[in-house]
Image (cartoon, rainbow, N blue to C red):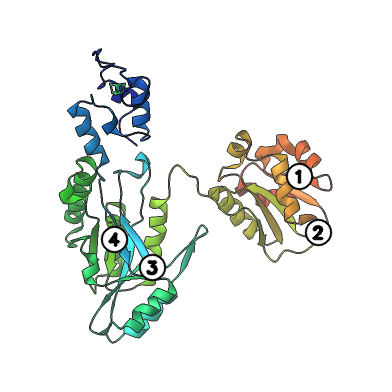
Amino acid sequence: MSELSGLQIFKYLPAAKKLAEGNCKKCGFPTCMAYALKLAKGQTEIELCPHLPEELKEIFTQSMKKPQKEVFLGHANKVLVGGENVLFRHDKTFINKTVIAIVLDTDENDFKEKLNRIVDFEITRISDTYKIDLIYLKGSNISSELTRKFDNLGFAWVVEDDLKEISMLEDKAVGDTVEELTKIRRKAILDKDENYSKPVAIYFEHGDNLLDLMAKASVYLCKYASMLIFEDFDEALISTLMTLRQNIYTDPQKPLQVESKVYEFNNPDENSLVFLTTNFALTYFAVANEIESLNKPAYLVVTPSDGMSVLTAWSAEKFTAQIAAKTVNNAKIADKIKNKQIIIPGLLAHMKEEIKEALPEFEIITGPNEAYLLNDFVKSLK
Ligand code: SF4
């Protein structure tokens, strides 16, 4: 794909300049415009037009350069570092999340204890489970038995020599480090300057105050470290950074979503309440938190809606009575409860009859418009 649009490319071609060779068809396309449109989409080659001006060739050569190198690290298992091509997440999306690496020094006394903690570490945030991305092995006792263990457990590991394609930046005062990181990223993205194209790692040595470390690492994660390497391993620090990272490295063009299924709360039984909503993550968590705090057994049926909230899903036809009925029937909700009632979001009150038609054995009850009103709403139910 070119950075130029078809129209921008066309302006450089002979037909646009009204030259005699315009629309000569030598490129295999009937007109210069047709060729320009294909070129913009990356569906043909610049070499096919013998009349392409040098100026346009140069623009293409520049646009083919990768702003920041993408580097594979690890042996049997690998992680990707770098490869970013925008300065800000909202410009498009970030590509490869900041890699979090822990140093494991085989000569240190607490080596085995640290190894076990690294292997055991795991957190789940909005349906995604994270473990340590990369283990940086040091010391004189790196055995093939140890590396095989990491390979078999699915961990990526490196030694110092594997980091040649990474720029290591010293952690100085926060302001200075951020300034340096920003300068490097701007040079890479805006100028495509190859001297700055390596992904950048910050190395944190033993013994930093944990809160200072948290503050610094969070700032560098946002701007613009491709990798953070820690000599100390603190589960709380890493959990916090991974949660922050998840926020920054999700694609802003794709809404966060949870799995479409039936979620259970407070040990549901045949007298449980049944709620219905869509799989937009924020909607789900708002509703789920309220249901949990009701302290009543309940099911929450979450329909597939491409991560759209209730009204958006309805307007995009991602929430229909048929989709709702299919989800409820697949989950065999009718077999699980006695009272056969389903509470739908208040925002979908206009669909009550439609849903009733699709789920004739259920009574459809219109719930509140907002999740925080669920508690009062349930108290008012007969
Ligand atoms: Fe136009 Fe070049 Fe194709 Fe001829 S070869 S039609 S000048 S784009």
Q: Contact, CB < 8 Å: mark 3 with mark 2? A: no
Which mark is in front, 2 or 1? 2
Please say whether residue 378 is visible from this viewpoint. Answer: no
Cα–Cα span, label 3 and label 2 = 45 Å
Q: In terms of sequence position, does the residue under pointer 2 or pointer 4 come before the other?
A: 4
Residue occupied by mark 1: 365
**Looking at the image, which is closer to me, 334 or 60?**
60
- SS label for mark 2: helix
Which residue is located at x 27 percent, y 73 percent? 231
Residue occupied by mark 3: 77
On the image, the x and y values in percent for residue 336 come to: 78, 60
The quadrant where ligand 1 appears is: top left
- Amino acid type of the residue tagged 1 in the rendering: Ile
**Looking at the image, which is closer to me, 316 or 43?**
43
Q: Which mark is residue 335?
A: 2
Residue 277 lies, with reference to residue 8, above or below; the image says below
On the image, the x and y values in percent for residue 80 come to: 34, 58
**Looking at the image, which is closer to me, 245 or 272?**
245
Q: Specify whether tag 1 is near ligand 1 (CB below 8 Å).
A: no
Q: Which mark is residue 227?
A: 4
Residue 98 lies, with reference to residue 311, above or below; the image says below
- Amino acid type of the residue tagged 4 in the rendering: Met
